[in-house]
Amino acid sequence: MTPSLSYSKSSQIDELIESEREPHREPIARITGLMVQYYHVCERELWFMSKGIDIDRDTPNIQRGSHVDEKSYRDSRRSFSIDGRIALDILDDGDVMEVKVSSTLEKPPRMQLLYYLWYLDRIHNVEKTGVLAYPKERSRERVELTEEAAIDVEETLEGIIEIVNSERPPALEKKPYCDACLYQDICWL
Ligand code: SF4
C-alpha cells in the first residue's frame, strides 16, 4: 500500500517503516508512544527506561501530570493497542484522543499524539486527526499530521534510536521538574 503522505527524509526512517510494516522482520527500534513523550521530557529518562531501569510508576509521586485520567471521556472513547507500539483511544467521531492532566508541559503529549497519527499513516495507511484534551482545564485542541509535524516526528524517532542504542546516558542536565522525577535519586544522589 502507498502511504497517504510521503515525507521521510531519512534512510533510517525508511528502514524503520519497512520493518514495522513486515511483522516477521526485527524493527531497528521498538518505539512506543511513551518513549516519544520521554524523549521530549528528558532524554536521560528515556535512556533509563530503554535499559529497563524502571521505577514503580503507580506511586503517588507520579510526575509531571503525565498520568491519564481514565475516567475522562470514558463513555465516548474506545482503547486500542496496535502492534505493541501504540496504545490509543479513538473517539466516537474517529479522532484519536490523548488525555492529559495538565498542559504545563505541552510538547511531550503533542509529540506523542503526533507519533500515533504518524504511525497509523505510515505503517497502516490510515489517516486520522487527533485531539489533545485537558479535562481539568476544560480545554481541547485539534492536532493534525501536517508535513512539518511529520518531519518533527521523524526527527524525534531518529533521536530516540540514537539514545536507546547508546551505551551511556545523555549528560546530566538540571531540569525544572527533576525534583518531581522518579529517577532523581539516580541522577542527583
Ligand atoms: S532527575 Fe532530571 S535529569 Fe534525571 S531523569 Fe529525571 S528529569 Fe531527567
Image (cartoon, helix red, strand yellow):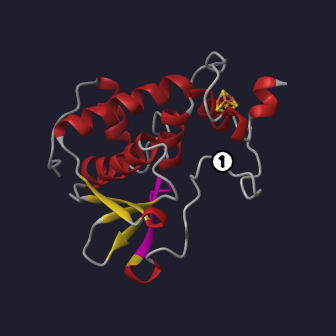
Eyeballing the image, is 25 above or below 74?
above
Task: Tell me the SS state at disc 1.
Answer: loop
103 vs 187, left or right, is left
Task: Give the residue drawn at x 35%, y 28%.
Answer: 155
Ligand 1: quadrant of the figure: top right
42 vs 94, left or right, is right
Task: Give the residue drawn at x 15%, y 39%.
Answer: 6
Out of 17 and 148, give the one closest to the viewer: 148
Q: Position of residue 28 (x, y in %)?
A: 46, 33
Question: Would residue 71 be visible to someone looking at this image?
Answer: yes
Q: Farthest residue in the right direction?
A: 189
Dividing the picture into quadrants, the one containing residue 27 is: top left
Check mark 1 vs ligand 1: CB closer than 8 Å? yes or no.
Answer: no
Eyeballing the image, is 170 above or below 85?
above
Q: Label 1, on which residue? A: 63
131 vs 58, left or right, is left
Out of 7 and 1, give the one closest to the viewer: 7
Would you call the spot at circle 1 few (<14 residues within 10 Å), some (14-19), or many (20 or more)? Answer: some
Q: Main secondary structure of the magenta part?
A: strand
The range drawn in magenta is: 78-88
Q: Position of residue 133 (x, y in %)?
A: 39, 62
Q: Position of residue 189 (x, y in %)?
A: 85, 24
Q: Position of residue 181 (x, y in %)?
A: 70, 39
Eyeballing the image, is 100 above or below 22?
below
Q: Is residue 129 magenta?
A: no
Task: Give the residue drawn at x 48%, y 34%.
Answer: 40
Which amino acid type corresponds to the residue marked 1 in the rendered image? Gln
Out of 106 and 146, give the one closest to the viewer: 106
